[in-house]
Image (cartoon, coloured by chain):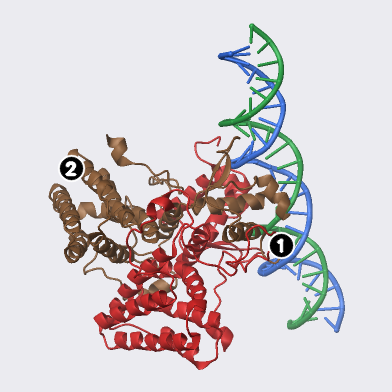
Chain colours: A brown, B red, C blue, D green
Amino acid sequence: MTEERRAWQQVLEHIESDLLQGRLRPGDRLPGERALATDLGVGRSSVREAFRVLEVLGLIRTASGSGPTAGAIIVALPTGGMTALMRLQVAANGFAVQDVVATRLVLETAVVHDLAGDSQRNLARPVELLDAMESRQLSEAEFLALDAQFHLSLAEAAGNQVITATMAGLRGSIENYVLAGVPNLPSWAETSERLAVEHRHIVAAIEEGDAASARTLVRDHITGYYAETGLAGRTPVARPDEDAAARTSVSHGDHVAVAAPASSPDAGSTPDPVVHPVVDPVVDPVAAAS
Amino acid sequence: MTEERRAWQQVLEHIESDLLQGRLRPGDRLPGERALATDLGVGRSSVREAFRVLEVLGLIRTASGSGPTAGAIIVALPTGGMTALMRLQVAANGFAVQDVVATRLVLETAVVHDLAGDSQRNLARPVELLDAMESRQLSEAEFLALDAQFHLSLAEAAGNQVITATMAGLRGSIENYVLAGVPNLPSWAETSERLAVEHRHIVAAIEEGDAASARTLVRDHITGYYAETGLAGRTPVARPDEDAAARTSVSHGDHVAVAAPASSPDAGSTPDPVVHPVVDPVVDPVAAAS
DNA sequence: CGGGCCGTGTGGTAGGACCACATTGTATAC
DNA sequence: GTATACAATGTGGTCCTACCACACGGCCCG
C-alpha cells in the first residue's frame, strides 16, 4: 500500500480505462505480463493478480506459448464471471434458494413473454435440447442438466445479454437445488414426464405468440416443481422473508442442499463433494451424449 | 500446469469445498497465505491470486496487521462482486445499454409489485433518499446518483438478495447512461422535477398496496426517461435486437457513453476519465451531503 | 525442396526478501 | 502499582528471480 491504492487495482484501473477509451477492444491482445509490469511500474505478481480477476470475470482468456493466440486476449464473455460469482456466493450462503427461485421466476417469465412477441425468434436450440431430453434414457442429473440448459437457451434466444448472463450464473444453483429436490418426489419418472410435457407447452405457447400463456406456463412450471419437492411451503416470490433480519448479520438460512444433507459437518473424513472448476469449461451434454 | 488444473484454481476449489462442507462459514478467518500455501503444496503467489479473485467477488475481505480483524475474512457480500463484474463488462462492451435498461425494467417492476403486496415492507430508506433528493440544490450527477440509490433501495427493501445484487451491479451502468442522456433533455430542471414526482407516486402506490399501479408507474418512469433522452427510438424490452448477429463476434454496439465521447482515441495526452476502484468503497451521498 | 530441431518469448509457478501495519507482550519510568 | 513506551511477532502487500512447460518461427540439414 505504498501507493494510495493497491498495485493490482492500478493495473485493473489501467485496463478498464483503456477499454473505456477504446484503446482496447474485444479481440485485442493485452501486453505481456512483464511488459505491462514495467510500463506501470509494478511487479509482475501484481499484474498477474489483476489478470486472474479479469480471467475469472470472463473478460480475458489467457494462453501460454507464442503466436497470435497466446497471451491475454479480451473476450468479454459475461456468462463466465457471473457463473463463478453465483456459485461461490451460494457456497458461502450469500444467496438463499428461495431468492434464486424468485429471480428465476421474474427473469424467465419476462423472457418467454418477450419471445412470444418477437417475430424474429429462433427456438432451434431450445427445441434441440428438448429432443435430447426425450430421446434417451437419462439419469436424473443428466436430465436436469439439460433442463437447466433449456431454460438458459430460452434466455439466449431472447437476446438480452444481461439476463442471459444472470441466468447462466444461476444455472449452477438451479441444477443443485433442483437435483436436491428429487428425493422428495413421489415418482421421478412421473415428474420428469410432466416436466417434459410442460416444456413442450411452453415452446408451443411462444410459437403461437401467446405471451400471456407462455408466462403462466413458465410460472407454473417453476413453482410447481418447487412446491412438489417441498423445498418451500409457499409460492416463492420476490419478497422479504421473515428471517431477513437474521440473515443480515451472519446467517445460514436454507441454502442449497448438497449431496449429503445428513452428514455431520464435523467428520473430516467425509469425502469432498464433486467441485467443478470455477472457470467453467462449458460442457455440452447434448454433444457429449450423442 | 504441472497439475491438471492451475494452482490458483486448486486453492479456489479447496475454499469452495470448505464452504460447502460447512468447515468455513461467513465471519470465519481463512488461514494465512503462507500457511495455506504450504498446506496445499502450492506457492504463496498462487494463494494470493485465488484470494484476489475471492476479494473482487465480494467473498472475503483482507486486512494486514495482526489481531482478530486481520487476515482474510469471509464476508459474502454479493453486491461488490456483481458491481465489479458489471462495470468491467460494460467497459468491454459486453453489455448493451438497451439490455441493461430492459433488465432494470423486468427486475424493478417485479420488485415494486412484490413490495406492494407485502405487509412487512419497510420503505424508510427509499423515502430518506427521496427527501435528500428534494431538500437541496444538487448537481445533475448528485441527483442521479441518489436516483440510482433510490431504485436500489427498493430492491433491498424487497429483500431478495439475488435481485438486489444484480441491481447493485447495474447501478454503475445505470448512473452512466442516465447521466449521458442529460444533455439530450430539453430542460433538466423540468425533468428532474418530474422524476421526483414520479418517485413519490411510486412509493405512494406501493404503500397503498396497489401492485398494478406501482408496476405501471415504474415502467413508465424508466421508459419515459429512456425515451426522452433519445437513447433509443423504441421501448426497451427484453428482446433480440437486429444487430445481435453483429454483436456476437466483435462489435461495439451502442455502449454507455462516457465523459468525453468526442475525444479522439489516439491522443495519449487525453486525460483519463475518472475511474473508480473496482472494489467498491460504498459511499453514501446522503450522509456525505448532509 | 522438405522435414526435424532449437531458439525465443509466452504464461504458470515457486519461493525469497523486503515493507508497512496492527496487535501483543514486556520492560521501563513515574 | 500504574501507566507509558518499546520491542517482538505475525499479517497482508509488493517486488524480484529463477525456473518450467509450451507453442510458434525460423534455421539448419538431409
How far is mark 1 from mark 2, CA to CA?
A: 61 Å
Q: Secondary structure at mark 2?
A: helix
Residue B122 is situated, as x and y percent measured from the top left of the image, at 36, 84
A268 vs D11, nearest the viewer: D11
Chain for numbered disc 2:
A
A35 sits to left or right of B173:
right
| Residue located beneath label 2 in the image | A134
D13 vs A55, nearest the viewer: A55
Chain for numbered disc 1:
B
Q: Secondary structure at mark 1?
A: loop
B263 sits to left or right of A85:
right
Q: Amino acid at mark 1?
A: Ser
Q: Amino acid at mark 2?
A: Glu
Image quadrant for the N terminus of chain A?
bottom right
| Residue located beneath label 1 in the image | B269
B168 vs A192, nearest the viewer: B168
Q: To which quarter of the image does residue A202 belong?
A: bottom left
Residue A172 is situated, as x and y percent measured from the top left of the image, at 35, 53
Q: Is residue A269 at all visible to an observer of this figure?
A: yes
